[in-house]
């Protein structure tokens, strides 16, 4: 049975895109691959809205975040980690693992980062070399105002803006050049409508300047290797070739639909999800003004065993949702709606949840 996969990634991949992966292997150092690499890179730049570089790495989102750090920083550099959840915390952990001095600017889980507080923190501390920020915090269902945060950073300092755009790019507008984002890291299994395995990383001119003096150890993720090989139409290392075929078609579809309609679709589906949950008497977990357009977090009602509900939805309705992570374990459900999601898929999710929750409450009583 095909399940209604409503976790916040990996997302269901449309059949035609999935089928592209059955393409026979080609020489990744041959002319066909070169043509495809140039074409998909051009498409990625359109989605990132950048004239700078975008590189494709065979890794997951965390690898892309690591690439953003090791390519721009040196051990001992001070970074401001703006965190509103588990993935924001992870960004700081990556920087710390490579020897950065990490100053955390934390906001309560379920709220968005306040750009004013970011500005204040930078005004007080001229030594910050980079600000690490999650665009869309998948663990809490919160969308940060990336444009306002980037503006606050640029208004207060010369710090680089490094962005975890894993669950935002291709679903929510990300204007890399216009907003002055120095590195944006994202991964294929989210709004790109692809299986996991590829990550996309952009670098601005300022990021390249930082790269020239950055001393963190790096090898596989060294952007200069990707740049050097790109000039001859090749990736530096054997890439996930099958995923490139899928990426080629996914980008064609995204760009043919047009980015504004893609973003509008995500916004509408997110609103429909929140409205449906509220109609059932449930509460959206985050501050609704900051509710994510790619994943909705909803508070588990009092007395309900969240894990049992998640399992009953899967086993009895073929609907797969996610629970909470870390301190939100057992406290929220998360419903993913990235990529080409139909209203029917959301309706089915809500109907299954409405049928399952009363039984979960009765079982406790
Ligand atoms: C916002 C965000 N950052 C980072 C990651 C980590 O990505 P990956 O699991 O692909 O390494 C995820 C994955 O869910 C995410 O949603």
Image (cartoon, rainbow, N blue to C red):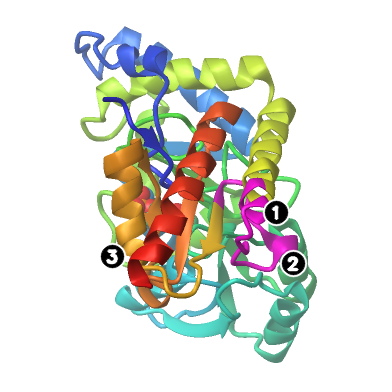
Query: At which x and y percent is residue 181?
Result: 64, 54
**Between 353 and 4, which is closer to the camera in this rendering?**
353
Mark yes or no: residue 347 visible. Answer: yes
Q: Which residue is mark 1?
A: 180
For the residues bearing labels 2 and 1, Cβ distance under 8 angstroms: yes
Could you say whether the residue bearing mark 3 is in a helix, strand or loop? loop
Res. 154 mark = 2
- 159 horizontally vs 62: left or right: right
Q: Is residue 358 left or right of residue 313?
A: right
Magenta highlight range: 276-295
- 197 drawn magenta: no
The residue beneath circle 3 is: 217
* Residue at 55% in and 27% down: 344
The picture quadrant for ligand 1 comes to bottom left
Report if residue 215 is visible in the image: no
Along the line of sight, which residue is nearer the eye, 347 or 80?
347
Tell which of 245 and 32 is nearer to you: 245
Mark earlier in primary sequence (2, 1): 2
């Amino acid at each position: 049975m095909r399940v209604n996969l409503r976790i916040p990634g990996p997302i269901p991949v449309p059949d035609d895109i999935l089928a592209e992966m059955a393409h026979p292997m080609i020489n990744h150092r041959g002319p066909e691959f070169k043509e495809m690499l140039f074409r998909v890179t051009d498409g990625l730049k359109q989605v990132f809205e950048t004239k700078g570089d975008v590189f494709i790495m065979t890794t997951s989102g965390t690898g892309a975040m690591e690439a953003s750090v090791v390519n721009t920083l040196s051990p001992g550099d001070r970074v401001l980690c703006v965190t509103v959840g588990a993935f924001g915390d992870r960004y700081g952990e990556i920087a710390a693992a490579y020897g950065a001095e990490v100053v955390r600017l934390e906001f309560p889980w379920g709220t968005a980062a306040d750009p004013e507080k970011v500005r204040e923190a930078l005004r007080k501390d001229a030594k910050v070399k980079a600000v690490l920020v999650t665009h869309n915090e998948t663990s809490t269902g919160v969308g940060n105002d990336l444009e306002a945060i980037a503006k606050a950073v640029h208004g207060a300092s010369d710090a680089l803006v490094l962005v975890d755009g894993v669950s935002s790019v291709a679903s929510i507008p990300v204007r890399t050049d216009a907003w002055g984002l120095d590195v944006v890291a994202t991964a294929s299994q989210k709004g790109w409508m692809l299986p996991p395995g590829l990550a996309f990383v952009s670098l601005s001119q300022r990021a390249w300047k930082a790269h020239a003096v950055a001393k963190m150890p790096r090898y596989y993720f060294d952007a200069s290797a990707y740049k050097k090989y790109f000039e001859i139409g090749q990736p530096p290392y054997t890439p996930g070739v099958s995923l490139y075929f899928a990426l080629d078609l996914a980008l064609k579809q995204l760009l043919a639909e047009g980015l504004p309609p893609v973003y509008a679709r995500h916004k509408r589906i997110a609103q429909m999800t929140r409205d449906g949950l509220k109609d059932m008497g449930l509460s959206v977990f985050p501050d609704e003004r900051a509710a994510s357009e790619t994943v909705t977090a909803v508070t588990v009602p009092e007395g309900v065993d969240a894990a049992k509900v998640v399992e009953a939805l899967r086993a009895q309705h073929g609907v797969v949702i996610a629970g909470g992570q870390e301190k939100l374990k057992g406290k929220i459900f998360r419903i993913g709606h990235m990529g080409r999601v139909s209203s029917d898929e959301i309706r089915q999710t809500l109907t299954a949840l409405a049928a399952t929750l009363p039984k979960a409450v009765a079982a406790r009583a």
